[in-house]
Amino acid sequence: MNDAAPTPLPSGFSYACPATLTNMSLRVEVAGTRLVIVDATTGSPVDAVWPYGFSARLVDGKAALLASDGTVVAREGDVLTSVNGSWTGGEVGEPGRAFHVSGFNGDCYTPSGLKVGGPGWPMPTATSTGLGSQDP
């Protein structure tokens, strides 16, 4: 893990979270020792790419998804709603297809993993973090 101090972004920086590109809701599940994401409607697995620094860990004996600042943003069994992001790769079901998550549950994250918006959040002067990720 990189323990670098947050680095301020350039003066006047602003970030607009992409509009919700899907009506998708995702459920957090566990398969063996891995945290997995499935479409909450169909149960189909979703190859999710999280913002930089997000990680999966066991917290109080349950799988948890953590944001880059270490905040638990979802636990095993939780459903993420109003998911923002975009698909890359091939067609549905083809190898290499992945959903790049940029926000959910009303929160917005930059690709560097910095939370920059959500309920009651003004758009602040942002800083980036240098935390890495690890598998559970």
Image (cartoon, grey):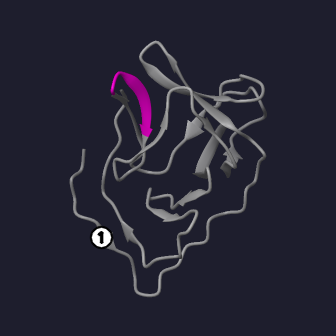
Q: Position of residue 56 (x, y in %)?
A: 41, 33
Q: Position of residue 92 (x, y in %)?
A: 78, 31
**Can you identify the residue that label 1 sits on?**
7
Q: Quadrant of residue 93?
A: top right
- Residue 97: in sight, yes or no? no
Could you tell whether 135 is left or right of 101 in the image?
left
Amino acid marked by disc 1: Thr
| Range shown magenta | 60-65
Q: Position of residue 25 (x, y in %)?
A: 70, 39
Most extreme residue toward the front is 120
Name above or below for residue 63 compared with residue 98.
above
Most extreme residue toward the top is 32
Instruction: Identify the residue at image location x=77%, y=25%.
Output: 42
Could you tell whether 8 is left or right of 3 in the image?
right
Give the crowd class for mark 1: few <14, some 14-19, many >=20 residues within 10 Å.
few
Tell me how many marks there are.
Answer: 1
Q: Position of residue 84 (x, y in %)?
A: 67, 52
- Residue 10: in sight, yes or no? yes
Would you say the magenta stretch is mainly helix, strand or loop?
strand
Does the magenta portion include 86?
no
Instruction: Identify the residue at image location x=30%, y=70%.
Output: 7
Secondary element under disc 1, as helix, strand or loop, is: strand
